[in-house]
Amino acid sequence: MKEQEGVRKAVALQYNSEQDKAPRVVASGRGAIADKIITTAREAGVPVHRDTHLAEMLAGIDIGSEIPVELYQMVAEILVFIYSLDLGAKKLK
C-alpha cells in the first residue's frame, strides 16, 4: 500500500566526531511522532531543517544506525550550515 502523501516525516540525527564515523539516526517518525520530534528539537534549541526527500531516505534507516555513505554529502551540507549558524550566534553574544 502506498503511503499517504502529505504525511509529515521527521528524522533526528546525532553526530559525535570522537566516537562515530558518521551521523546516526536517533529518532524517526511520521505524523504525530514526527510532530513530537520537531517540537522537542525546537524546544531544545536544536535547528530544524526541512528536506522531504532527505527525510524520506533517512526514515528507512534503523534507529541507532549510522547514515549510509550515499547520504554523507547531503547531510554534511546541512551540518556545515548549522555550524555556521552556531558561529554567527556566538559572535552576536
Image (cartoon, rainbow, N blue to C red):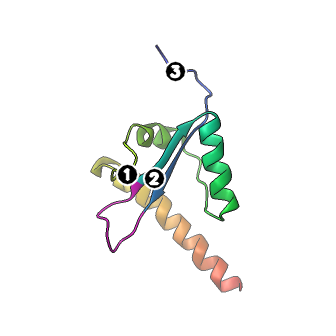
Quarter of the figure with residue 15? bottom left
Q: Residues within 10 Å of mark 3 (few under 14, many from 20)?
A: few
Vertical comparison of 45 with 50: above or below: below
**SS label for mark 3:** loop
Residue 59, how many percent across, how many down? 45, 39
Q: Position of residue 6 (x, y in %)?
A: 62, 27
- Badge 1 is on which residue? 64
Q: What is the spatial separation of the Cα atoms under label 1 and label 2, in whole angstroms?
A: 6 Å
What's drawn in magenta, residue-wise?
15-24
Residue at 71% from the left image edge and 83% from the top image edge = 92
Closer to the camera, 44 or 6? 44
Q: Which residue is mark 3?
A: 3
Q: In percent of the image, x 60 and y 48: which residue is there?
A: 37
Q: Are marks 1 and 2 in contact (CB under 8 Å)?
A: yes
Structural distance between the alpha carbons of marks 3 and 2: 23 Å
Amino acid type for the residue under numbered disc 1: Gly
- Does label 3 or label 1 sit earlier along the sequence? 3
Identify which amino acid the numbered label 3 is placed on.
Glu
Residue 16, magenta (yes or no): yes
Magenta stretch: dominant SS? Answer: loop
Judge left or right: residue 21 versus residue 38. left
**SS of the residue under disc 1:** loop
Separation of disc 3 and disc 1 at Cα?
24 Å
Badge 2: how crowded within 10 Å, few (<14), some, or many (20+)? some
Identified at 66% across, 65% down, the residue is 45
Residue at 65% x, 36% y is 32
User: Callout 2: helix, strand or loop?
Assistant: strand
Pointers 3 and 1 in contact (CB under 8 A)? no
